[in-house]
């Protein structure tokens, strides 16, 4: 038996992130007209606002991890998508980029310094710290959407059935939606 592998952990967190986002977006697709954008009590004022925030922050950090040049332009439009279908397509795309990044991750790449554009400065952080922050950010805001769904016609979905082997019986729909199979998750 080998020891702890932080690179494997980041890869599995990226898989979990993509699967949880698919499940959450599918639940939101069942909302009645007006519920997606309805004003609610949370950090952001609606499910629509919160899901757009998750997306733009993902654009920002994934681009930084990829050494891109998007920077603060990720936030030029606070809510770039009014329609859930368009937002979901973009979330799937950026989740795929994050998965690909984590699948290529090596121990050396995990500790490389990432430049993150901030207003008037460049923030410099280790890639593994940026990844930890991203996964925490995602979980935090998905939880807010989950809570907001409790006040809609749609029951909040289970969002923590993706990482352990015993959960295979619950994740088939999400795996199929992403074109994945169990072998991908168990690497």
Image: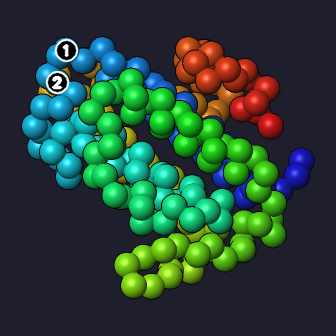
Q: Which numbered dot is residue 32?
A: 1
**What residue sits 56% from the left and 37% below the top?**
93
Position of 184 with respect to 135 (left or right) is right
Residue holding disc 2 = 35
Residue in front for this viewpoint, 167 or 25 = 25
Check whether the beta carbons of the residues at disc 2 and disc 1 lie within 8 A of each other. Answer: yes
**What residue sits 39% from the left and 24% below the top?**
85
Q: Quadrant of residue 5?
A: bottom right
Q: Position of residue 72 (x, y in %)?
A: 42, 66
Q: Secondary structure at mark 1?
A: loop
Q: Is residue 82 above or below residue 1?
A: above
Quadrant of image for the C terminus: top right
Q: Categorize mark 2 by other alpha carbons within 10 Å: few (<14), some (14-19), many (20+).
A: many
Q: Is residue 185 visible?
A: yes
Residue in front for this viewpoint, 38 or 166 = 38
Position of 55 with respect to 187 (left or right) is left
Position of 41 with respect to 22 (left or right) is left
**What residue sits 63% from the left and 44% below the top?**
97
Q: Is residue 136 visible?
A: no
Q: Secondary structure at mark 2?
A: loop
């Amino acid at each position: 038996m080998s020891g702890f592998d932080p690179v494997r952990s980041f890869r599995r967190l990226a898989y979990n992130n993509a699967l949880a986002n698919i499940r959450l977006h599918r639940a939101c697709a069942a909302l009645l007209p007006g519920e997606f954008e309805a004003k609610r009590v949370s950090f952001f004022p609606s499910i629509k606002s919160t899901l757009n925030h998750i997306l733009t922050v993902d654009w920002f950090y994934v681009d930084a991890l990829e050494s891109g040049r998007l920077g603060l332009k990720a936030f030029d439009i606070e809510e770039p998508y009014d329609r859930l279908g368009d937002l979901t397509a973009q979330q799937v795309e950026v989740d795929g980029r994050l998965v690909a990044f984590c699948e290529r991750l090596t121990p050396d790449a995990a500790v490389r310094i990432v430049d993150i554009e901030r207003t008037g400065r460049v923030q410099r952080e280790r890639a593994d710290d940026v990844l930890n922050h991203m996964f925490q950010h995602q979980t935090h805001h998905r939880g807010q959407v989950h809570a907001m769904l409790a006040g809609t016609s749609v029951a909040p979905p289970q969002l923590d059935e993706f990482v352990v082997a015993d959960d295979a019986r619950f994740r088939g729909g999400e795996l199929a939606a992403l074109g994945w199979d169990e072998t991908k998750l168990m690497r």
